[in-house]
């Protein structure tokens, strides 16, 4: 009866401990969790002392339990150690801890294999340990797998960014330190211009344009002002700020436009997406394991309830581009660049990038028509990338299976086309 009561108490304490914020760095809950843990250890020790077995068996079992406790602590550390910076050097420490954990696990298996338990239990332990070992080795491999993602939130995306998103100049832009040249060509835009998904900056369309012009004996000083997530308004701010701080002025502006530059003008329309709730265990696995995180990034959990058609992103884009009053707001942002070029008597070229996953979508939504009309009425040269890359399949157009930004091949095509358009 005493043992039964003690078991109930231990289960209660463990349940209590589970729901306390164990890793909270401060506060009464942190103190309570420590006290709860100490009580669990105390009760387990008292319960252990009531078991009547030989002293030799007790020593062996105690050794096994100590190894098991160390194992649990290591697993706990392995699951949380990388969370602040999953792409940092802490991965090497994590890999060492995984190897130590496997070493402890092999000692436990050795202990079980020499004990008097049945062969069924021995084989079960061996099977479980072998499976975990294989998963652990795969986990170590995925700690260094990089894959460009559209958002960069997945661990593999963060690793990609940490590995390839360089150099960063003093203006916070992905480019070499700017220098003044005889003919300065500013490439202004968002992540397409900055080269998201492109491993080397020399493979971006801006650098390729400069290279192709150099081959023709026309030297330009290419300056990349691309910023991830920028829209036309922010792009003009970055453009002005750069000129003021660097005292370098453009002789030609290449402004890159993407369909989401109008996102700031999309009305809410009460299209609020209810957050998808996932279980705590799945959250722990996604944040604690590079392997699970990678699988989840490739096959993400989506909301089970579909949004109404009018709330879909493409439908809302269509509404913006087909509503004159809203489109005029975006025109005013484009006009800032136009007025600057007119005032300073320089040329401007606009590049339009469509959805890499569906080249026809921009035309169907009325986006291409708006840009063509705007450029035509303002005598601005427009390079519509769609027609130049229609011979490429989706895999050739995209930088990765999870990133719909332009591939190196697309950048090469665009850079070559620009070199034939820019007149310096």
Image: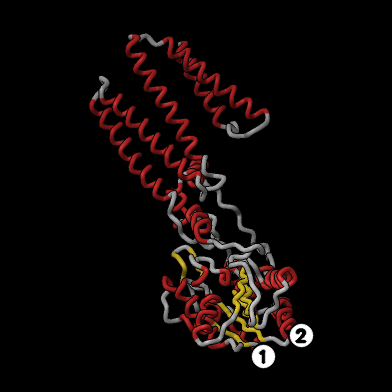
Question: Quarter holding the C terminus?
Answer: bottom right
Image location (x, y in percent) of residue 414: 51, 80
- Between 314 and 82, the one lying in front of the other is 82
Q: Which mark is residue 396?
A: none
- Between 177 and 333, the one lying in front of the other is 177
**Residue highlighted by disc 2:** 343
Image location (x, y in percent) of residue 413: 48, 80
Q: Residue furthest left?
A: 119
Question: Quarter holding the N terminus?
Answer: top left
Spatial separation of the CA atoms under disc 2 and disc 1: 15 Å
Image location (x, y in percent) of residue 65: 40, 22
Q: Which is closer to the viewer, label 2 or label 1?
A: 2
The secondary element bearing badge 1 is classed as loop
Q: Is residue 317 visible?
A: no
Image location (x, y in percent) of residue 134: 33, 43
Residue at (67% x, 69% y) in the render: 266
Residue at (57% x, 83% y) in the render: 219
Tell me: residue 118, above or below residue 285: above
Residue at (46% x, 53% y) in the render: 296
The secondary element bearing badge 2 is classed as helix
Tell me: residue 122, above or below residue 352: above
**Residue highlighted by disc 1:** 379
Q: Decide which of tag 2 and tag 1 comes sooner along the chain.
A: 2
Q: How would you rate the neighbour count of disc 2 (Cα within 10 Å): few for under 14, some for 14-19, many for 20 or more?
A: few
Q: Is residue 56 visible?
A: yes
- Between 172 and 370, the one lying in front of the other is 172
Tell me: residue 79, above or below residue 357: above
């Amino acid at each position: 009866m005493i043992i039964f009561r003690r078991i109930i108490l231990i289960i209660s304490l463990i349940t209590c401990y589970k729901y306390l914020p164990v890793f909270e760095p401060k506060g009464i809950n942190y103190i309570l969790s420590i006290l709860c843990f100490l009580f669990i250890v105390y009760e387990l020790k008292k319960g252990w002392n009531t078991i009547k077995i030989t002293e030799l068996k007790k020593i062996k079992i105690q050794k096994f339990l100590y190894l098991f406790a160390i194992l649990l602590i290591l697993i706990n550390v392995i699951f949380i150690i990388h969370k602040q910076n999953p792409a940092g050097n802490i991965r090497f420490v994590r890999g060492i801890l995984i190897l130590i954990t496997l070493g402890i696990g092999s000692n436990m298996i050795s202990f079980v294999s020499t004990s008097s338990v049945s062969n069924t239990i021995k084989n079960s332990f061996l099977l479980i340990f072998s499976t975990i070992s294989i998963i652990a080795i795969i986990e170590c491999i995925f700690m260094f797998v990089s894959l460009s993602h559209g958002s960069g939130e997945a661990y593999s995306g963060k690793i990609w960014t940490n590995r390839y998103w360089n150099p960063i100049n003093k203006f916070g832009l992905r480019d070499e330190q700017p220098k003044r040249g005889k003919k300065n060509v500013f490439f202004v835009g968002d992540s397409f211009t900055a080269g998201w998904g492109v491993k080397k900056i020399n493979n971006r369309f801006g650098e390729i344009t400069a290279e192709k012009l150099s081959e023709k004996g026309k030297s330009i000083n290419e300056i990349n002002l691309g910023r991830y997530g920028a829209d036309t308004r922010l792009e003009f701010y970055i453009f002005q700020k750069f000129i003021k701080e660097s005292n370098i002025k453009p002789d030609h502006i290449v402004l890159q436009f993407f369909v989401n530059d109008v996102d700031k003008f999309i009305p809410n329309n009460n299209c609020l997406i209810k957050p998808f709730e996932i279980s705590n265990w799945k959250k722990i696995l996604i944040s604690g394991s590079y392997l699970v995180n990678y699988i989840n990034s490739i096959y993400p959990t989506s909301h089970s309830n579909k949004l109404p058609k009018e709330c879909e992103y493409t439908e809302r884009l269509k509404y913006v581009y087909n509503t004159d009053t809203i489109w005029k707001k975006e025109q005013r942002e484009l006009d800032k660049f136009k007025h600057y070029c007119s005032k300073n008597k320089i040329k401007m070229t606009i590049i339009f990038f469509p959805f890499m996953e569906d080249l026809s979508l921009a035309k169907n939504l009325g986006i291409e028509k708006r840009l063509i009309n705007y450029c035509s009425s303002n005598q601005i040269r427009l390079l519509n990338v769609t027609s130049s890359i229609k011979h490429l399949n989706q895999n050739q157009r995209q930088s990765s299976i999870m990133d719909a930004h332009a591939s190196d091949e697309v950048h090469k095509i665009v850079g070559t086309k620009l070199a034939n358009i820019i007149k310096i």
